[in-house]
Image (cartoon, rainbow, N blue to C red):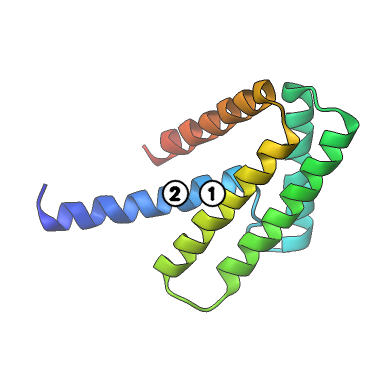
Amino acid sequence: MDRSELVRHSLRSTRALWLVVVLLIGAPLPGNAQEVDRAQVAAQVETAKARLQLSADQEKALRELLHEQADTLKGIRDADGSRREKMQKAKAAQADFRGRLEKILDPKQLAEWDKMRDELKEKARERRR
């Protein structure tokens, strides 16, 4: 792979990672961000509720976590800084999200969450093709 191909591949990978982060965490898209955020979080919680068989407490905690994560990512996206800095902050936010998610879900639910995440990644890959 020559340098230009490597750069193009790197850019595609970066874009794909951002898409996955947005899809997994439910960051609001441009537009009326608050409405989009609420709709995305509601959809994510409903999907998780059905697939993970969440208790009422887990559902509430997950909803709060997803709202906080969406706000965090919006703050990162809207802040000044280079794309690289924003990616690093988003990765750190994702690691924090995962740690907090592990406190909400049991191991079986977490495994199913990971399956849901992998399905979203695959859909993102298919759209890129």
Q: Quadrant of residue 110?
A: top right
Q: What amino acid type should be assigned to the residue bearing mark 1?
A: Val
Q: Quadrant of residue 83?
A: bottom left
- Along the viewing direction, whichever of 17 and 60 lies nearer the viewer: 60
Lateral position of residue 57 relative to residue 108, left or right:
right
Q: Label 2 vs label 1: CA separation?
A: 6 Å
Residue 97, image x and y in percent? 63, 48
- Label 1 sits on a secondary structure element that is helix
The residue under the point 35% across, 49% down is 13
Residue 126, image x and y in percent? 43, 33
* Label annotation for residue 31: none
Whether the residues at callouts 2 and 1 have beta carbons within 8 Å, the answer is yes
**Can residue 30 be seen in the rendering of this structure?**
no
* Label annotation for residue 17: 2
Lateral position of residue 118 relative to residue 125, left or right:
right
- Along the viewing direction, whichever of 56 and 116 lies nearer the viewer: 56
Q: What amino acid type should be assigned to the residue bearing mark 2?
A: Leu
The residue under the point 61% across, 51% down is 96
Pick out the residue farthest to the left. Answer: 2
Q: Is residue 49 above or below residue 1?
A: above
Q: Is residue 118 above or below residue 73?
A: above
The residue under the point 86% across, 28% down is 55
Residue 88, image x and y in percent? 46, 61
- Along the viewing direction, whichever of 16 and 65 lies nearer the viewer: 65
Which quarter of the image is occupied by the C terminus? Answer: top left
Residue 78, image x and y in percent? 59, 72
- Label 2 environment density (alpha carbons within 10 Å; few <14, some 14–19, many ≥20): some
- Label 2 sits on a secondary structure element that is helix
Residue, disc 1: 21
